[in-house]
């Protein structure tokens, strides 16, 4: 295989670093939800802060993907990936809107135990969608670069 056909280690390293950062952000939200005891104004404020941080990270991450980068390069290498990449990119505004809705409902939902459980469940649903989204991105990357990164398994 020529060097032109090989994946660029800088691009792959950047993608892997972005996904590690995203995983860390998601874990921070999970940890904030896992705090002991009933919800308080402080614990709600902590959740909102971590959700906003996650939202900003996703906004930046999605903007980078939409402006080119590995998705575009994957399509250039394997044009058959265009429909899959387009579908993945179309999920970005939906995911951000879901996160915005979760932030808004957390701010207005109060500190009752029932509200807290509902917010945890909504975040768990969002996290599952994000993980599926990231798996799809990883699949395009692996297909486009013909590189097994061990990310989809």
Image (cartoon, rainbow, N blue to C red):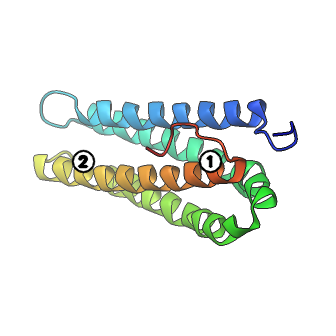
Towards the viewer: 127 or 143: 143
Q: Please name the residue shown 30% across and 30% down the image.
A: 31
Decide if residue 123 is on the left or right side of residue 71.
left
Location of residue 83 (image quadrant): bottom right
Residue 144 is left or right of residue 32, and the answer is right
Q: Which residue is mark 1?
A: 142
Residue 36 pos. (x, y %): 16, 27
Furthest residue in direction bottom, as rendered: 83
Q: Position of residue 74 (x, y in %)?
A: 73, 54
Q: Residues within 10 Å of mark 1 (few under 14, many from 20)?
A: some
> Residue 101, position in %: x, y?
41, 61
Element type where label 1 sits in the image: helix
Look at the image and tell me in which quarter the N terminus lies: top right
Residue located 79% across and 56% down the image: 77
Q: Which residue is mark 2?
A: 120
Q: Residue at x 23, y 53 (%)?
A: 121
Mark 2 burial class by Cα count in 10 Å: few <14, some 14-19, many 20+: some
Marks 1 and 2: which is nearer the front?
1
Q: Nearer the viewer, residue 17 or 118?
A: 17
Mark 1 and mark 2 residues within 8 Å of each other at the beta carbon: no
Q: Nearer the viewer, residue 5 or 59?
A: 5
Q: Residue at x 70, y 69 (%)?
A: 80
Tell me how far mark 1 sits from mark 2, CA to CA.
Answer: 32 Å
First in sequence: mark 1 vs mark 2: 2
**In the rendered image, the vertical position of residue 65 relative to residue 12, given as above or below:** below
């Amino acid at each position: 295989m020529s060097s032109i056909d090989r994946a660029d280690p800088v691009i792959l390293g950047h993608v892997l670093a972005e996904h590690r950062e995203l995983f860390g952000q998601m874990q921070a939200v999970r940890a904030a939800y896992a705090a002991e005891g009933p919800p308080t104004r402080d614990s709600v404020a902590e959740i909102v802060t971590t959700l906003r941080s996650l939202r900003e990270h996703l906004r930046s991450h999605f903007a980078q993907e939409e402006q080119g980068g590995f998705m575009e390069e994957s399509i250039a290498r394997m044009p058959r990936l265009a429909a899959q990449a387009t579908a993945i990119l179309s999920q970005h505004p939906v995911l951000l809107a879901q996160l915005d809705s979760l932030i808004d409902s957390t701010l207005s939902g109060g500190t009752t135990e029932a509200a807290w459980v509902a917010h945890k469940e909504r975040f768990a649903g969002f996290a599952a969608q994000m993980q599926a989204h990231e798996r799809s991105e990883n699949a395009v990357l692996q297909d486009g670069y013909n590189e097994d990164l061990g990310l989809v398994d």
